[in-house]
Image (spheres, grey):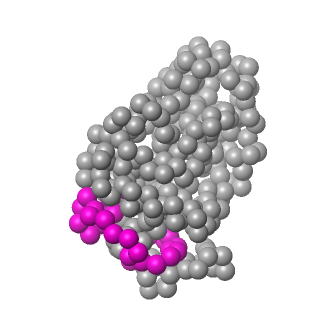
Amino acid sequence: MKISTTLARSAAAALFAGTLAMATAAAATEGYGDCPLTGQKGTASIKPAVPGQFTVIINLPAVGQFNGDTPDTIKDGFEFCMAVNIANRLGLEKVKLVNASFDSIVAGQNKDFDIALALISVTEPRKKVVDFSMPYATSDYGIAAKAGSTLDEKSIKTSHMGTQAGTTMVSYLQDELKVEKVDVFDDTGSMFTAAVAGKVDGVMTDLGIVLGQVANSGGKLVAVGKYSTGGQTAGIYPKGSPNNPIIDKVMEELKADGTLKQLEKAYLLESFGGVSPDDVPAWKP
């Protein structure tokens, strides 16, 4: 079931104090969770899918990106606060989150939204059914395993692995690595639950998601390796929407003025339990 909510008011600009030029405290309290704001409100405008709000499709759980178990509990996170800053610069005071399956997002099956953010890899087949935003991150693959696992670069090919339906990791495991057995899960949560229970030897998904889930596992999981893919991560727009280039321009500004870099420092490294993506061993296919 899809769950949606208008996020509660709060002010938390202190995260960027002394680092970025912030909006006034009053401006930072309108419908944006605990996210700090940068830049000027209303410097661009769109005709949103739902009047008066910025509607964002997400896929939970996404520790570090959208911190909360359901849309109504999310107050911060990298992708969430990026969406909040986009909404602010578009002059929209409300951000509505709608949880959906990853499969439906990349297949372009959702309606009445402005952008989908779920650490989505840019691929040519997906471009046929959706429009991508400007890339805002790289998309390396991470591997998590139960604590004490002996899974490594060599044994992965003869292992029992898990990944999520609709992701580029399915074909990577099956066709690139030629792993002996691959289970495909409908959602992120069940995939990591299977890893903790030892039902699979390991799971593969975006490295950022792996690090967030490992840090949130209470020591039950470890990040054992990563594959560098050279891929890019972007948001998804409704196909052919006239809003797409306008939102892209705002995202370019957030990148150029340092907002995205500061959001990364504020939310991702903390959610990774202090573990940098650079600390994870690099494996070769």
Q: Residue at x 53, y 30 (%)?
A: 169
- Percent across and percent down for residue 252 are 51, 61
User: Magenta region's main secondary structure?
Assistant: loop
Res 259 quadrant in image: bottom right
Q: Does the stretch in magenta take in 33?
A: yes
Q: Does the stretch in magenta take in 45?
A: yes
Q: Which one is nearer the viewer's eye here, 93 or 135?
A: 135
Vertical placement of residue 249 versus 218, above or below: below
Res 131 quadrant in image: top left
Res 87 quadrant in image: bottom left
Segment colored magenta:
30-56
Is residue 67 visible in the rendered structure shown here?
A: no
| Image quadrant containing the C terminus | top right
- Percent across and percent down for residue 221 are 65, 39
| Image quadrant containing the N terminus | top left
Vertical placement of residue 159 versus 272, above or below: above
Vertical placement of residue 54 versus 120, above or below: below
Q: Residue at x 54, y 52 (%)?
A: 136
Is residue 112 visible in the rendered structure shown here?
A: yes
In this rendering, would 2 be left or right of 248?
Answer: left
